Amino acid sequence: MKRIALRSATIWILVLVLLGGLGFFLFEYFMYGDQWVISQGSPHIYSGENIDTGIVLDRDGILLLDTSDNRTYSATKELRASMVHWLGDRNGSVSAPAIAHYAKEMAGFDVLTGVYSGTEGGRATLTMSAKLQLAALQAMGEYKGTLAMYNYKTGELLCAVTAPNYDPDDVPDIESDETGAYEGMYMNRFTQSVYIPGSIFKIVTTAAALEEIEDIREQTFTCTGVQEYGTKDVTCEHIHGELDFDGILAQSCNCAFAQVVEQLGRKKLEKYVEKYNITEPIYFDGIATAAGNFDLEDCAPVQVAWSGIGQHKDQINPCRFLTFMGTIANDGIETTPHLMQSITCSGEETYRGQGSIGERIMPVEVAQELQRMMRNNVEEKYGLENFPELTVCAKTGTAQVGGDQNSNAMFAGFVTDEAHPIAFFVAVEDAGYGRQVCVPIINEVLQAYLEAF
Ligand SMILES: [Zn+2]
């Protein structure tokens, strides 16, 4: 009798352990099942590094990627190359964080029925336009760099091309290349790179001066070609002579900007770089952009001056600077970009992207004054005829990078027409002067935009 009682007690203990384990499993399953199924390496959803379920379309419904059968990319070589930094490649050399971020919505995991992508699969629609990606790719030609455009009202990223790029259906022999043509090819320069801004940074200094120096608009500045600091001077390539505040931005006069920086002082300059989030990463669709740099520690006055001119140790991320352009155009309210428009799974909408409308970071009158001054740049310096049909406001930059490389050419700005709320940014590496190189490139994409929208 004693033995039977012992046995039944043992069985009861085993049953309790089993039930406890089952309960624990079910709890974990319901709580974390969706994460298990989308975890890296889940064979249902991934092939290698990149998500492998459903299809990805551009904003007009053009197929960019079908992952249902070993990744089929879009039909044209150029479109495949222009999108590789967003969609990833087959072996995961280029990752696609935005698509991977929505694995759950794409796979349509349900705790009762499991992964139901098998029936129809996810359909992700991006904010990007294939037409604009192709135009941007073509406009960049053989240059390295990045070109992007977004809607500063909605946050929709309309195009963002990185060069060099490659066709994931025809991967070049990068290993044995000695020309350097593929250098940095796997990096999404728009989100992950930083550049010395050069003169496009003068917009930041101009904004700070408008906020801090009451009579800045009434001041005149004299450029003799050299602003002396004892050891290393600030210089201009030409003697600009006497200029008003509009003039110093249009002529991009280093000497005058050194004088503005002297009036502002180091602390105020730092304050506005922080206030406008110039060096802060941006987070969207599971992507974190690279942080910029603005460092005035242990700086001599001449270095502080060069910092306000976009040299010294200044570094900016393209996505962040594009957003800053959007902020000025949007009268001082920051709208961060996003890439994912919507996702449906088996006919049901599982995600809808929204622009993240941020806070006001700049007074409306300062933003509007910057719009006017950047419009004046185009009228006085870059040529209205170079931007037909659109009210373009912009600033060029020519950033010296040292070594035997040519300068990086930069161009940042926006359109103020009510019907076309777009901001743009382009960085062209090893290219020369901002105005000569970037103006025709950006206009080519703006004209494609007018055709497409
Ligand atoms: Zn000057």
Image (tube, rainbow, N blue to C red):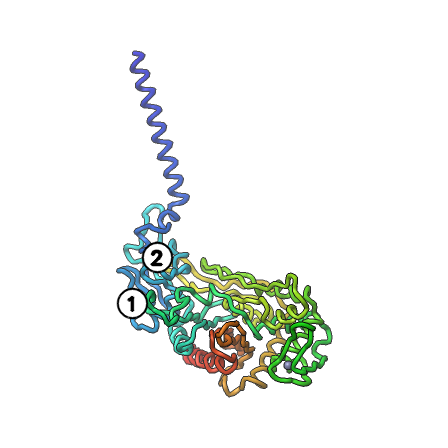
Residue 117 seen in this snapshot: yes
Residue type pointed to by label 2: Ile
Q: Nearer the viewer, mark 2 or mark 1?
A: 1
Q: Which residue is identified by label 2?
A: 51
Position in image of residue 115 (x %, y %): 32, 51
Please state the total of marks drawn on the protein image. 2
Secondary structure beneath dot 1 equals: loop
Horizontal side of 120 relative to 429 (left or right) equals left
Label 1, ligand 1: CB separation under 8 Å: no
Q: Quadrant of the N terminus?
A: top left
Position in image of residue 190 (x %, y %): 46, 67
Ligand 1 found in image quarter:
bottom right
Residue type pointed to by label 1: Asp
Which residue, as the protein is rendered here, is positioned at the far front?
A: 231
Position in image of residue 275 (x %, y %): 62, 63
Label 1 crowd (10 A; few <14 / some 14-19 / many >=20): some
Position in image of residue 255 (x %, y %): 66, 78
**Cα–Cα span, label 2 and label 1:** 17 Å
Secondary structure beneath dot 2 equals: strand
Residue sitting at x 48%, y 60%: 284
Q: Quadrant of the C terminus?
A: bottom left
Label disc, if present, on residue 342 of the rendered structure: none
Label 2 crowd (10 A; few <14 / some 14-19 / many >=20): many
Q: Are marks 2 and 1 in contact (CB under 8 Å)?
A: no
Q: Quadrant of residue 382?
A: bottom right
Which residue, as the protein is rendered here, is positioned at the far left?
A: 69
In this orientation, which residue lies closer to the viewer: 420 or 260?
Answer: 260
Give the mark nearest the N terminus, 2 or 1.
2
Q: Which residue is identified by label 1?
A: 169
Residue 60 seen in this snapshot: no
In this orientation, which residue lies closer to the viewer: 320 or 197?
Answer: 197
